[in-house]
Image (cartoon, grey):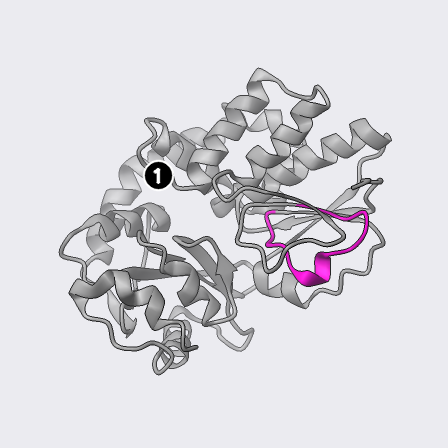
Amino acid sequence: MTVIAPEIICTHEGDLDGLLSALLLRRLAKKRFGLAPRIEAFHNNYWKSRNPGEKVSWITDLAFEKRLDRPHWMVVDHHPPECAPLHAKLVHDAAKSSGLLSYELCLEEGLGSEVLARLVHLNNVSDLFLDADPEFDLACDYAHLVKIYGFWNVFQLIEGEPERLLHHPLLEVMEVKRRVEDPLGYEWSRGKIESLGPGVAWVPTTVGNPNLIVHRMLKDPSNPYPVLVTLFRKGNGTMLASFRSRGGQALAAAVAVQGGGHPNAAGATLPKSINSAGEAARYLRVQLTGKIKPVAAEGKDDLEQAFKDI
């Protein structure tokens, strides 16, 4: 499949993987074609409603769909694809982050470096939530930079140069937040879990990294919910729901509310009319109740099947 110069690089706005993979692909385009395409970033719901009108695009960290199957387009991603490509070039591996897949393309053009390899490794650990890795906490600190400060703020801070992320001074802030805030946030949240439907519950959060707090809860044998949800309000007022699991059920729950993502880490952008966490929880409860068959606490592995009648 011939790949020609892209007009644009589209990526996921919500995390470090989207940022890093887009920056690497832009560098690849500059090496191959002598140009640096503009980058646009989207959350899943807005991406699904966008009309991809460009003649040639590179897409990363956004799931491959039939509407993206166009000649000379390239999609670099690790989410479950909607279909097999007939026209586009699909670079896909569910066991690798989009950042790693993009870096491997860069290596083919001689664009590798020790700094980039280090960043790609940390991103891979955090995005795939490889909690057995000895650098898992540090990797989450890097990922949390984008969660806390926002995609475009970090983009501007490093002036589009990914190498400037390594050892960035703001990582000291992330380390202190993890060490001080996470234990406080966990103790506050664990007594306030609210059921949203069979096998799914909302975890209110105050301080700390919600993903790490929820991950700790999911590892607790006394937790009866295989899917835990946290809610986040963006600066523009949009409410985001983040779904987490350990047995592959999070994606099905997110899809039930028009979201997407990975089997154990998925998300959804909620309707603009929802203005608070309480309203978001009520919305999710209505959407999920009736779509999911009841699942006993000891039957956690059956939750994914419970979504198949949606």
Q: Main secondary structure of the magenta part?
A: loop
Q: Residue furthest left?
A: 222
Q: Is residue 68 magenta?
A: yes
Q: Residue at x 85, y 54 (%)?
A: 55
Q: Is residue 273 above or below residue 300?
A: below
Residue range highlighted in magenta: 61-75
Look at the picture and state if 306 lies above or below 27. below
Q: Residues within 10 Å of mark 1 (few under 14, many from 20)?
A: some
Q: Which residue lies at the image location 46% right of the left edge and 41% below the top edge?
A: 127
Of residues 197 and 163, the one nearer the viewer is: 197
Q: Which residue is mark 1?
A: 177
Kind of residue sitting beneath label 1: Lys
Q: Position of residue 88 (x, y in %)?
A: 74, 50
The quarter of the image holding the C terminus is: bottom left
The answer to which of 181 and 211 lies nearer the viewer is 211
Q: Is residue 77 magenta?
A: no
Q: Position of residue 268 (x, y in %)?
A: 49, 64
